[in-house]
Image (tube, rainbow, N blue to C red):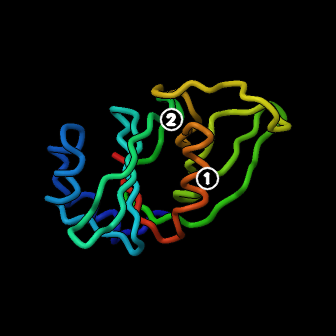
Amino acid sequence: MIDNDLLKLYNSIDYSKFNKDILAFVKENNIKSSTEYLIITSLALKYTYIFKQSLSGWRFIYKWACTVGKPSTPTIKGIFNISGKEYSFGTNTYSVKYATRIIDGYYYHSVLYNPKGTYIIDGRLGLALSHGCIRLKTENAKWIYENIPNGTAVIIY
């Protein structure tokens, strides 16, 4: 369920520098997170950015290629707070690892594995082809899973 206060905040942000200078976007909009981390995903560029709070403000630490939702099952846009994790989940045709919940059924997680999770069946990144989740290299999804606490702010635009 989308938080109305976060929706108002999302709609009040100036996105003019979002896909041009992500650090300037964060600083100029005075983006906040209730933890020492911030995650931002650009749906247009298909990158996920990780920031860590320092004494002088947000410090950019990672930029990772990602796969986002295809047109028929788009990734949601908005501001969210990380709200749970699952080591893995899947169906009878695929599985994913290191799933970190953005909201409801939307997660940051690994690329697709076979149902038993023993080998990658679709490792493509930088495309719009997921069911709405944000796919990352397995090691990047694992980093988020192991380091990003619940309550961390997420901006997807």
Visible residue check, residue 107: yes
Q: According to the image, label 1 marks what residue?
A: 105
The amino acid type of the residue labelled 1 equals Gly
The structure residue drawn at horizontal position 46% and vertical position 66%, both measured from the top left corner, is 81
The structure residue drawn at horizontal position 65% and vertical position 61%, both measured from the top left corner, is 85
Residue 153 percent location from the top left of the image: 40, 64
Question: Depth check: 5 or 110 in front?
Answer: 110
Q: Which structural element holds mark 2?
A: strand
Viewed as shown, does residue 133 lie left or right of 11? right
Residue 35 percent location from the top left of the image: 42, 73
The structure residue drawn at horizontal position 73% and vertical position 55%, both measured from the top left corner, is 87
157 in relation to 112, above or below:
below
Mark 2 vs mark 1, CA separation in Å? 12 Å
Q: Which structural element holds mark 1?
A: loop
**Upstream in the sequence, badge 2 or badge 1?**
2
93 in relation to 152, above or below:
above
Visible residue check, residue 78: no
Q: Which mark is residue 48?
A: none
The C terminus: image quadrant: top left
Q: Are marks 2 and 1 in contact (CB under 8 Å)?
A: no
Question: Depth check: 79 or 97 in front?
Answer: 97
Q: According to the image, label 2 marks what residue?
A: 69
Residue 10 percent location from the top left of the image: 28, 59
**Label 2 CA crowd tier, 10 Å (few <14, some 14–19, many 20+):** some
Residue 23 percent location from the top left of the image: 22, 51
**Label 1 CA crowd tier, 10 Å (few <14, some 14–19, many 20+):** few
The structure residue drawn at horizontal position 64% and vertical position 52%, both measured from the top left corner, is 99
Viewed as shown, does residue 14 lie left or right of 62? left
